[in-house]
Image: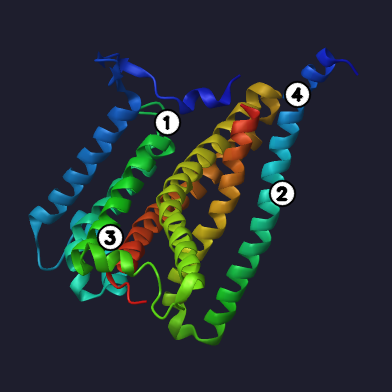
Amino acid sequence: MNLMEHLHPHAYIPLKIGGIDISITNAVVAIWIASLLVFLTLTLAGRAGRLVPKGIQNFMETLVQFARQTLVVEILGEEGLPWFPFIATLFFFILYCNLLGLIPVFPGFTPTSNIWVTASLAIVVFLCTHGAGMVKHGIGRYFRNFVPKGMPGGIFGIILTGFMLLVEIISHFARPFSLAVRLFANMTAGHLVIMVFISLIFMISAFITPVSVVMAVVMMAFEIFVSVLQAFIFAILASIYISLAVHAEH
Amino acid sequence: MDATSLGQLVPGLAKLGGGLSIGLGALGTGIGMGILVGKAIEGMARQPESAGLLRTTMFIGVAFVEALALYALVVTFLLIF
């Protein structure tokens, strides 16, 4: 049995335009459902707008307050609040995608366990980070900030400056890469572990069923924790990267 | 050993390498994460009032440490499948 098989999206409606594959796969459907759920829950919770929150408003208000306080204000400060919609969108979208993947059969696919999805999100964060830095400091000064002030002069200083620039550029490109791979590998690994525990029934014998089902349930509970944690980590790292670019006072 | 039997060995060796990769990766990451969480709890026990900040910082650190094990996991996937 090939364990990797269920990690590949399969097409519901195969579609090809100009050699580019844009089939409606279960990954695409899962992303649509996640976006729709984010939209529906947040608007329904906000629509009521009671002063004393009740029901779903209570729940979503806690999450939004958490996103506003912990993810934005504590890192970017009060003047970073224009970034709140972006960070909160990242948080809620990734959270819903992660949790949606835990539901078996339909859509039966975690969008965030696909490297393309996580890499796209990470590239958006990368562009936002540098865009924010350039808008705040101006393009020239932003790139000058890559090298600390007070470098020695002469030929040695030029070599050192080039070297530091290289290290800085590599570290800037490593960030979106690690963001993407972290989310992707966490989700893939968690779902594979559940899959392996269930597969043990077919691989060994039917007598092992109670053990493997209990272990799968335990891993499922752990996966819920990991889903929330990874959404939090992705959003807070995006926030930290933006704050590093905006407050680049070397 | 002739060339064909050496060629037959390669898939097995790749699986062995994959297993070793995630094993050794998890070993180092486990040690690192143990130190990280242990120190964070030490700090929380000393100063319970700063527990919230410490917990947030700890989770960010855990994410960085954990990423290393996950890189090893990706290499394992590449080697085995």
In the current view of this chain or complex, which residue is farthest to the front?
A: A154
Chain under numbered label 3: A
Residue picked out by circle 2: B24
Left or right side of A35 for B70: right
Left or right side of A59 for A48: left
Question: Mark 3, mark 2: which one is toward the viewer?
Answer: 2
Q: What mark, if any, has residue B10 been given in the picture?
A: 4
Residue picked out by circle 1: A104
A35 shown above or below A166: above
Cα distance, mark 2 to mark 1?
32 Å
- C-beta proximity under 8 Å, tags 3 and 1: no
| Residue type of the residue flagged with mark 4 | Val
| Residue type of the residue flagged with mark 2 | Leu
Cα distance, mark 3 to mark 1?
25 Å
- Residue A99 position, x and y percent, is 37, 43
Chain under numbered label 4: B
Residue picked out by circle 3: A63
Residue drawn at point x = 13 percent, y = 49 percent: A43
Q: Secondary structure at mark 1?
A: loop
| Residue type of the residue flagged with mark 1 | Pro
Chain under numbered label 1: A
- Residue A27 position, x and y percent, is 34, 29
- C-beta proximity under 8 Å, tags 2 and 1: no
Question: Mark 4, mark 2: which one is toward the viewer?
Answer: 4
Q: Residue B21 is drawn in which quadrant?
A: top right
Dot 4 alpha-carbon crowd within 10 angstroms: few under 14, some 14 to 19, many 20 or more:
few
Residue at mark 3 shares a chain with residue at mark 1: yes
Question: Mark 4, mark 1: which one is toward the viewer?
Answer: 4
